[in-house]
Image (cartoon, rainbow, N blue to C red):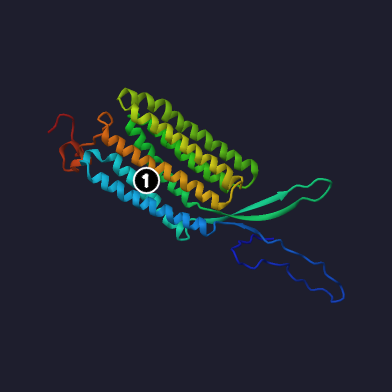
Amino acid sequence: MGDYYYQPGDKLPGPTPTSTAPTIPLPTVSVTPPEFEHITDFGHRTLWVLFVLMLLSTLAFIGLAWRVAIPKRLFFQITAYVTLISTFTYYAMATGGGWNYHHVWVTHEHKHDIPDTHKVVLRQIFWARFIDWALTTPLILFNLGALAGLSGSNLLNTLVAATAMNFTGLFSIYSHGRRTKWGWYAMAWIAFLTVGWHLIINARVTAQRRGAQLLYNPIALYTVVVWIGYLVIWGVSDISRGISPNETVIAFAVLDILAKPALGFWLVLGHDKSSHTQVNVDGVWSEGFGHREGLLRVGERDGDA
């Protein structure tokens, strides 16, 4: 039997009729309809609320960035990019895009020699979230790394681990087979532990060295705790189907507010008030490529003017 892709309201395929004598009765063949798990109007309204919150946060971060000189705008601009990407993501999901149905084959085992029963579950998965996280997670980590003065090597390791965490989380949701799903999920936790180790151990040392520990340490701990929430929701929602799609949307909405606008305002306002955590980027960043310190001249040797 070939694959069949279901949508709500579709007529299910019945048995193919065969040519038989009218005097021979045929057994009745029944097809169990699939079970759909998708968001309701409440979940849909939640997506619109998050779109508005992300949009307002983006406008606020842009306004805050205009208040400071260009060499000091790094944190402000990157934070605005984070909420801007989430604005696009929530608009896509709220308008009916960025999702599909994931086919799940559920088996109910019975005792006493009773045959196992099976059913097809089609669960709504918002894959647009993973595109969002793949883009915003490195930006958030870059902000934290710049705040702490993390070395380029450790920052690169952190970014790669975060990317691996997002991809393995995606694979765990779309994989078939219980062992495969939880295998990918375990890899996501290993990648997260790598990210957490760099944020809590390596970056904490460099932040203390440059006098930024009072701002960085609580922000880093807060970020790690919030990201633990993401992995927990992955496990109990789209992997194990322990909560409904509506509850999944609400849980991720709360986490996205904590991880993006809330963290962003804490970071930029704390950075703006602290004299020990100022990160100034001169040269090309503020003066353009016409500035002598930021001009790249091919073929020029050291000492030539």
Q: Is residue 144 left or right of residue 1?
A: left
Q: Quadrant of residue 235?
A: top right
Q: Is residue 8 left or right of residue 54?
A: right
Residue projecting furthest to the front: 42
The amino acid type, in three-letter code, at marker 1 is Val
On the image, the x and y values in percent for residue 270 come to 31, 35
> Which residue corresponds to mark 1?
82
Q: Is residue 287 left or right of residue 167?
A: left
Total number of numbered labels? 1
Q: Quadrant of residue 160?
A: top left
**Which residue shows up at 66% across the image and 56% down it?**
120
Q: Is residue 98 left or right of residue 277?
A: right
**Which residue shows up at 52% across the image and 45% down it?**
170
On the image, the x and y values in percent for residue 238 come to 57, 48
Q: Mark 1 packing: few (<14 Cα in 10 Å), some, or many (20+)?
A: many
Q: Secondary structure at mark 1?
A: helix
On the image, the x and y values in percent for residue 207 come to 34, 26
From where the camera sits, is residue 16 visible?
yes
Report the quarter where the C terminus lies. Answer: top left
**Which residue shows up at 54% across the image and 43% down it?**
233
On the image, the x and y values in percent for residue 213 come to 34, 26
Residue projecting furthest to the bottom: 22
67 versus 89 height, above or below: above
